Amino acid sequence: MKSIFLLLPILLLVNCGSKEPAVRPQEGQVSDPILKPVIQSFADAVDASPSAPKPRIELGMTYEGAGMNELAEATYKQYAIQFPDRVIGWYRLAIVQQKQGKIEEAIKSLLNAAELAGSKMDSPHWQLAFWYIELGDFDNASKQTELANSKKPNSMQVQIAKGRIALAQGKPELAIDILNNNQLIASIPDGYVYQLLGRAYRAAGDEEKSREAWSRAGQSKPNWADPWTKLVIEHVVGLNAMRQDIIKQMRARNLLVARKLIDDYFTYDKDNRVVRRLDAKCNSLNGKSAKAMKKYLVLITEDQSDVVTMVLLAKLRMHLKKFQTEEEMAITKEILMEVIEISPDHGQAKILMESLPE
């Protein structure tokens, strides 16, 4: 049974919110030449039909896709007030609140979504579980994990949540038992499961397996898809969309497509550091290691705290035969030591440094 107490304050505001004008960016806030006219078109559609749900949610998704989370939050709040019985408004509101670090507000919004979710919609529960884990609230994390499991048994998200809870509660052997699953490892990109296994093996005292896991690990957490992720992606336009597409093509090793996208992107914006790293990595994957290394060094010279680029440079050096001499390995070690000095908890840098010969 849905809790009327969660939704009552919003229900009382429905009539007040039904005619709200579109949330629009301030003058000069949007400079992206591709994004700006799209936002204007959706905002005009909202003002033309303020009681219609579609234009308002599309405007919110456009803001969300562009990373304009404050504008997305304001728009999703309007939608949630106007349509309080629709899961989508609460869910998207929660996501953009969490992105802004408003974790307690995000949890409240997502609890509303969970109250409205059907018998097969597990995503509000596993998302809540992950957020509770971040807060160290393992009782609520476990409850939400079990709710997710009751709707969709043994999903990737449920397995990861159970593994993370076990690891956080000092049960590394249980975490290893849950996470050391080839299908799970293959299903989640960027070696994320290996990150968790690296921590679990170390906690269990198996340094060799910990190093092996960390050598296969990436540096990021997965972006878990919920029922509306695809819709949000479809509303991603402009340079942000191009960046996401470049990352997608790089991961799929579609290097010719990635190279064209990178070159197209640079016609609009030559300074974006994320795309410049991707540009260098694309060179590396195409066998142009010297060019890649030069680009990494330029990025580090510009920002000597750029640990992401430093790790990429170190990994590239570790894969090239000419940098396997004692002198060159010492330089690689210096790079990794610099990363650890800047970011003492950088687990991958520590593991990479330990994997270098003495």
Image (cartoon, helix red, strand yellow):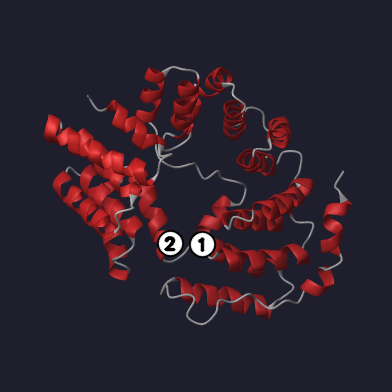
150 versus 72 height, above or below: above
Badges 2 and 1: C-beta atoms under 8 Å apart? Answer: yes
Q: Tell me residue 240's x, y (percent).
A: 43, 62
Residue name at image x 69 percent, y 78 percent: 21
Q: Identify whether 321 is placed above or below 77.
A: above
Count the labels in the image: 2
Mark 2 or 1: in front is 1
Q: Secondary structure at mark 1?
A: loop
- Is residue 59 visible in the rendered structure shown here? yes
Disc number at residue 240? 2
How busy is the neighbourhood of tag 2: few (under 14 within 10 Å), some, or many (20 plus)?
A: some
| Circle 1: residue type | Gly
Q: Residue 200 placed where, x, y %?
A: 50, 24
Q: Residues within 10 Å of mark 1 (few under 14, many from 20)?
A: some
Q: Amino acid at mark 2?
A: Asn
Residue indicated by mark 1: 67
Instruction: Tell me if residue 312 comes above or below residue 48 in the rendering.
Output: above
Q: Please report whichever mark, 2 or 1, sits nearer to the chain's N-terminal start.
A: 1
- On screen, residue 185 versus residue 293, left or right, reads right
